[in-house]
Image (spheres, rainbow, N blue to C red):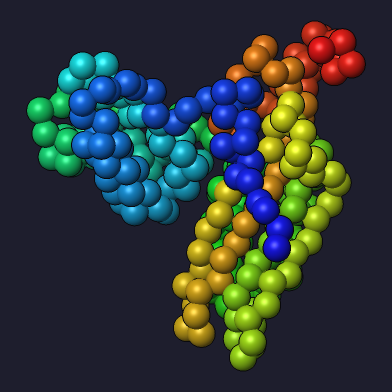
């Protein structure tokens, strides 16, 4: 059996940053479950807005929640009414806390693995061909500047009696290279004949360890990031 490691956890502290930034000695369990509750609620509440990630920072009784979304207009609403409503709902979930919300737009959703996976899962739910959905996602990512992409779907594909897994890829996806910025996302498609899992790996570029912490994939212009890396003339042999 293959031993798989999560691409994000593998690079945590090297080129990736934590999604929760706080420290607690006595209330760790309580705050941890509160973070999970907030993330689950926002994901379900704003699923149509394309939520890629939710970052949480805590300092005392202040909680700063950063929402990365492909459709910031749906999150903010007219004159910020929707944002205020979400803030009130989060304050109910975490009592005695001062909540502040920040919304960041993902300008390149085709480079964000989580959004790509959710898009493929949605197409499969609508009875679209899974092969066509995978191929379209791969072509879109490569056209946007990704160095490589791998997509894997598993389950009762096309309603087959026996579950199977199929995958497609383009370019290179060096999973064992720590300096390789690889975005990873998963989604589940709920069909009438069972659930189908979708996994997506996107290789964006190489980053010098401990020199540059990337933003969320799709937030920054990938070409600009690559140019910054080239300016530094990073040579792994010198390390």
Classify 74 as above or below 61. below
Q: Is residue 145 left or right of residue 211?
A: right
Quadrant including the C terminus: top right
Task: Look at 25% across and 37% down and name the residue there.
Answer: 29
Task: Look at 62% across and 91% down and name the residue there.
Answer: 161
What is the x, y in percent for residue 87? 22, 34
What is the x, y in percent for residue 40? 33, 49
Task: Look at 74% across and 17% down and name the residue there.
Answer: 208
Q: Quadrant of residue 15?
A: top right
Residue nearest the observer in this picture, 33 or 160:
33
Classify 96 as above or below 50. above
Q: Is residue 100 left or right of residue 46?
A: left
Question: Can you see residue 49?
Answer: yes
Question: Can you see residue 88?
Answer: no
Quadrant including the N terminus: bottom right
Residue nearest the observer in this picture, 46 or 71:
46
Task: Look at 60% across and 19% down and name the residue there.
Answer: 213
Q: Is residue 67 left or right of residue 130?
A: left
Q: Name the residue furthest bottom.
A: 161
Residue nearest the observer in this picture, 33 or 230:
33
What is the x, y in percent for residue 170? 84, 52
Q: Name the residue furthest front.
A: 1
């Amino acid at each position: 059996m293959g031993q798989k490691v999560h691409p994000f956890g593998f690079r945590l502290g090297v080129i990736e940053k934590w999604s929760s930034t706080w420290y607690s000695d006595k209330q760790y369990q309580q705050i941890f479950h509160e973070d999970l509750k907030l993330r689950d609620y926002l994901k379900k509440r704003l699923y149509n807005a394309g939520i890629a990630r939710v970052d949480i920072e805590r300092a005392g009784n202040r909680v700063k929640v950063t929402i990365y979304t492909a459709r910031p207009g749906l999150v903010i609403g007219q004159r910020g009414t929707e944002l205020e409503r979400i803030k009130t709902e989060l304050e109910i979930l975490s009592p005695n806390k001062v909540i502040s919300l920040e919304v960041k737009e993902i300008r390149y959703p085709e480079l964000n693995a989580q959004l790509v996976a959710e898009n493929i899962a949605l197409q499969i739910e609508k009875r679209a061909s899974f092969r066509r959905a995978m191929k379209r996602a791969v072509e879109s990512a490569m056209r946007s500047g990704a160095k490589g992409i791998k997509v894997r779907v598993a389950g009762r594909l096309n309603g087959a009696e026996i579950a199977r897994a199929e995958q497609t890829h383009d370019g290179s996806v060096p999973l064992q290279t720590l300096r390789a910025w690889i975005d990873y996302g998963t989604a589940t498609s709920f069909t009438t004949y069972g659930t189908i899992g979708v996994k997506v790996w996107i290789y964006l570029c190489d980053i010098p360890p401990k020199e540059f912490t990337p933003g969320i994939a799709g937030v920054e212009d990938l070409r600009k990031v690559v140019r910054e890396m080239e300016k530094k003339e990073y040579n792994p042999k010198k390390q």
